[in-house]
Amino acid sequence: MKVVWRLGTATVREVYEALRENRRVAYTTVMTMMNILETKGYLKKEKERDDRAFRYRPVRAEQTTITSMVAEFVDRVFDGASRPLLLHLVKSGRLSEKERAELLKMIKGAD
C-alpha cells in the first residue's frame, strides 16, 4: 500500500521493483498481496492500454485505510481487544522513549 500511495497508481511490476530496492521479495508474492488488497476493497485495478497489465490505485485515503487495516488486525489477532497489542508494543521495546511518552500523554488526555 505504501508504494501505491507514494506512486499514486502502480502495476504489480512497479511495486515489485520498488520493494526489491530494500528487500528480497518474489514477484508472485507481490501479485498475490495486491490481489488480496483489491479483493478487500483497498485497491482498485484497471486494465492498462496495452491490455497486458493492471494498474492499481488506492480506493481510500491513506489514513482511512490504515485505520481500517489496524482495526481488522486487532479483530483478527487480538479478538478486538487493543490492550494486548499496546502491551506487546510497550514490552517488546519497539516503542522509543519519546513514543511511550506520547502514548502516555494521549491516554491521559482521553479521560
Image (cartoon, rainbow, N blue to C red):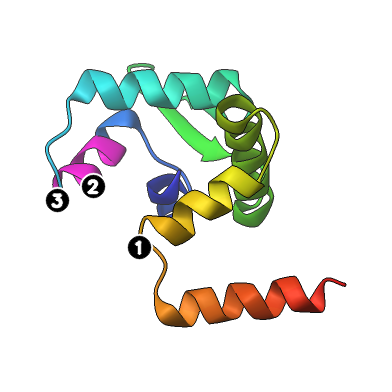
Give the mark nearest the N terminus, 1 or 3. Answer: 3
How packed mark 1 is, by other alpha carbons closer than 10 Å (few <14, some 14-19, many 20 or more), is few
Q: CA distance from mark 1 to mark 3?
A: 27 Å
Q: Amino acid at mark 3?
A: Glu
- Do callouts 3 and 2 mark residues in contact (Cβ within 8 Å)? yes
Q: CA distance from mark 3 to mark 2?
A: 6 Å
Q: Amino acid at mark 1?
A: Gly
Q: Quadrant of residue 17?
A: top left
**Closer to us: 102 or 16:** 102
Is residue 59 visible from the viewing direction of this image?
Answer: no
Residue 65 point in image, percent of width and height: 63, 45
**Is residue 88 shown above or below 17?**
below
Left or right: 29 as drawn, with respect to 111: left
**Closer to us: 59 or 29:** 29
> Dot 2 corresponds to which residue?
18
Q: Quadrant of residue 97?
A: bottom left
Q: Which residues are magenta?
A: 14-21
> Dot 1 corresponds to which residue?
93
Label number found at residue 21: 3
